[in-house]
Amino acid sequence: MPEPALQARLDAWRARVDAALARALPSPDTPPQRLHAAMRHAVLLGGKRMRPLLVYAAGTAFGANEAALDAPAVAVELVHAYSLVHDDLPAMDDDALRRGQPTVHVAFDEATAILAGDALQSQAFVAIANAALPDAARAALCAELASAAAGMCAGQALDIDATGQSAAFDITSLERLHALKTGALLRASLRMGAIAAGADAASCSMLDRFANALGLAFQVRDDLLDVEGESATLGKTAGKDAAQAKPTFPALIGIEASRARLDALAGDMRDALSTLPVDTTALALLGRLAIERDR
């Protein structure tokens, strides 16, 4: 498929999941209005939608129709949004800007942000429970998402412990941290698309090599953007990692080595996709977008 057609396909998936997310969230007019407004603020004010796009790309590659992928796509984005709400809290990263908007605890208040994050995570599993899929698929999707969410919490705990410790951190520890904090949900997104398509365990496992390279590449790019980007473009506070002495790829190995690592991971993604017995053009484009993005 030519790249303009592929890009149009991604845009259509993004619009599809945006509409599905709006339907899945409580109305801001339903009590408690403040909580529901905060949930919608966290989810509906933009975002790359990388994780839902991975669900659609993997699922359609393995033969699913888009309707079967809506629920897992919604679920992974709700879990991602919850994690951002909690990551931004004063007790965590203490950030005031997300997606070019005030973070939830700034726009509302800290207690509401905590409750909104909790509710978004719960709503993700409601979406899967109500999906028009076989019982076995829904159970597998719940297990996959729950495991990823637990991994994200473990990664965040490691990240908190590492703050201010960049000089004492090594690259192996950094990669382990991000395999949990960032990579776990990206991997789950791919596997959930395949599960919803009815793919077997072996097929899901074949996606893992691509997922592991993608997750690491996504974080290396994030670290480079924090150094080289501007807050207005990023939609979040630039330079925060260095200010907090967080271990990052540029801090540990330098900017040029980080760029070289990104190039190597791009090659790893291409090699991984070449082993899959399905059409991987949409997955390949998403991999490229992950390492070329400017926010």
Image (cartoon, helix red, strand yellow):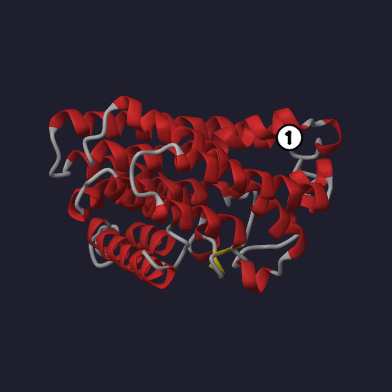
- Looking at the rendered structure, the kind of residue marked 1 is Ala
**The C terminus, quarter of image:** bottom right
Q: Position of residue 130 (x, y in %)?
A: 16, 43
Please indicate, yes or no, whether residue 91 appears anywhere in the rendered image: no
In the picture of the structure, the residue carrying the numbered disc 1 is 162
Left or right: where 146 falls relative to 84: left
Q: Secondary structure at mark 1?
A: helix
Q: Nearer the viewer, residue 95 or 242?
A: 242
Q: Position of residue 195 (x, y in %)?
A: 27, 36
Q: Position of residue 70 (x, y in %)?
A: 24, 52
Q: Residue at x 68, y 49 (%)?
A: 262
Q: Nearer the viewer, residue 172 or 34?
A: 172
Q: Position of residue 289 (x, y in %)?
A: 53, 60
Identify whether 238 is placed above or below 247.
below
Identify whether 174 is placed above or below 224.
above
Left or right: where 128 falls relative to 100: left
Q: Residue at x 74, y 44 (%)?
A: 248
Q: Nearer the viewer, residue 37 or 284?
A: 284
**The N terminus, quarter of image:** bottom left
